[in-house]
Image (cartoon, grey):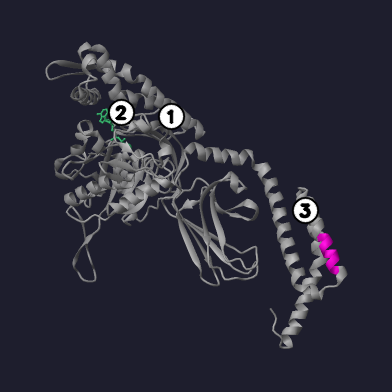
Amino acid sequence: MAKVAINLSTGALQQAEVIVGIDLGTTNSLVAYIHPEDKKPIAINDQGRGTIVPSVVHFAQNGETLVGTEAKDYLITDPANTIYSIKRLLGKSYRDLGEHKDYFGYKIIDDDSEGLVKVRVKDKFYSPIELSAEILKELRERAEHSLKTPVNRAVITVPAYFNDSQRQATRDAGKLAGLEVLRIVNEPTAAALAYGIGIDPNEEKTVAVYDLGGGTFDISILSLHQGIFEVLSTNGDTYLGGDDFDRAIINHWISENQLVADTINQDKNLSQELRLKAEEAKKVLSSQEVYTSNINGEIECHLERHTFERLVAPIVARTMENCRQAMADAKLKPEQIDAVIMVGGSTRVPMVYDAVSEFFGKPANNSHNPDEVVALGAAIQADILAGNRKDILLLDVTPLTLGIETMGGLMDPIISRNSKIPTKAGRQYTTSVDGQVNMKISVFQGERDIVKENRKLAEFDLKGIPAMPAGFPKVDVNFILNADGILKVEAIEVRSGTRQEVEVKPQYGLTDEQVEQMLMDSITHAKDDVSARMQIEARSTAEQMLYQVERFVDKNAEHLTEEEVALTRKNVQNLKNVLASGGDKDAIYGAVDVLEAQTSPFAERVMQISIKKAMSGKKID
Ligand code: ADP
Ligand code: MG
């Protein structure tokens, strides 16, 4: 049902636009919206097909593209043309996949290990963005069909650890599916919102979100402060989830049944049947004590809950180890966590629920459907962005400082770490050489004073600066960081209006560990950095000075006496010697001062002469 509003000026009924919330999952995806009457989020169940859409795309022989449950059926019968877990490839290069290259049953192109990966299906190549777009298109169509209104705008969730490149890829996938993506939201933030956390801007809370899905596990520790969710730490395992529970059950059945053990490797259908039975058994055991079934009346599939728990205990224990690590990273004790939220289908396993509640010393929240909770939160965020909840403003912060390289390889911070986003900041720069018409803008991320210790995000040339003496052009460099954490950098030469901009889409994002490492390094190296910075600044000052003085002497030698020129050359040489011998900053500044004191009267003299010439009508250059 679409929202209907009355346009007061015309009195006509007007359809207000629905903005949907989308959970684009590794295993399953969902779309949700806010019901216009009761204002509650609800997952869309189009034509009774269920709310869950398996994140699987199948390219059928007849050229059709299937998405969801129908596509999932082809995972075993036609794996080469059936794409699953596409989220794992978003924003990644072949090299990024590392040891997990064999995980995928379809063909991943490996001829370019640096560029973003592509998937080969028959004779066509697809980017993960295009494949994700197929899933989003399906969700969009289901929403339009069910709500009987066009759906053009959405909020899409991503894991908290997704880097810029992965976030940008998600956004691009939305665009390709015909959706304007209003915001990329962290999955744990969405889950917290679904539980009403973050709705009241005065609330201060620390929240743990435990998300165990089909193939991935994420634990996120969030702090809510003045309406801002800050990710204090994340941990997890990108190759651990409910699928491992299924595999443990299959292995158990194989070990128990000789017939199965003998035929499993030859019989594709049997392995598929077994997989389905194992998942079914797991789900049944979430609410019952015993599962009994069979395959073709021949092979008995029997499992009791206590056996299942013995089988999966090591897997659950691994997730608890990740929780411990996340808590250590956030420097928090379990009793400092105000709320624990369960997300992901696998948290329905009672043993998982008990382990998490015990670890945090309080009952975890599981009143919402764990499959749907992220999509529901995304719908709430969409509603906030639609302006339907004016009282709430959700903000995020940027984890690392963003800046540009200035003379001598120093980092000039423009947006500092922990700034609220979206945000915009800028600074004015100028040229260092006469007649300089290009300016290289290098964008870095990190906390160190020296750019080479930070991470380069982008580099571009501002071209077409009008030729002017050094120091004359005025170049405004602006950083615009949007709500998804995606950075746009623009450079404008103020006099000429010459303008250049780049959207920073770093090929390789940072893992959380890398971000942490960068922060740690900035602390341990802070002292070295300060002295290195001072040293570099001294050198830059000296080089600028030398450049200015030599240029001045060349141009204006006629106005100087021979002795003055000789003394200048001597002082210039002295400064050069100090630099060449690697003198420390005090030695450099000492020589700079001598040169400066000696030459500063020249500028004034030449100025006087120029003025006199100008007044006498002569042209000066
Ligand atoms: P993702 O976020 O990775 O897309 P989901 O949150 O949808 O994944 O979780 C999918 C996993 O949840 C699957 O492994 C599925 O078998 C499991 N699952 C779903 N329902 C249950 C249940 N009742 N008991 C145990 N596991 C379940
Ligand atoms: Mg999920």
Q: Is mark 2 within 8 Å of ligand 1?
A: yes
* Image quadrant in which the C terminus is located: bottom right
Q: Residues within 10 Å of mark 2 (few under 14, many from 20)?
A: many
The amino acid marked with disc number 3 is Ile
Residue 210 lies, in percent from the top left, at 37, 33
- Kindly check if marks 1 and 2 are in contact, taking CB atoms under 8 A apart as contact: no
Q: Residue furthest right?
A: 563
Looking at the image, residue 440 lies above or below residue 236: below
Q: What secondary structure is found at the residue carrying circle 1? A: helix
The amino acid marked with disc number 1 is Cys
Q: Which mark is residue 323?
A: 1
Q: What secondary structure is found at the residue carrying circle 3? A: helix
Res 415 seen here: no
Question: How far is disc 3 from disc 1 in space, using C-alphas?
Answer: 52 Å
Question: How far is disc 1 from disc 2 in space, using C-alphas?
Answer: 17 Å
> Bounds of the magenta span?
564-571
Mark before the other along the chain sequence, 1 or 2: 2
Mark before the other along the chain sequence, 3 or 1: 1
- Front residue of 449/260: it is 260
Callout in the foreground (1, 2): 2
Residue with the mark numbered 2: 242
Residue 264 lies, in percent from the top left, at 23, 19
Q: Which mark is residue 487?
A: none
Q: What secondary structure is found at the residue carrying circle 2? A: helix
Q: Does residue 123 appear to the left or right of 440 in the view shown?
A: left
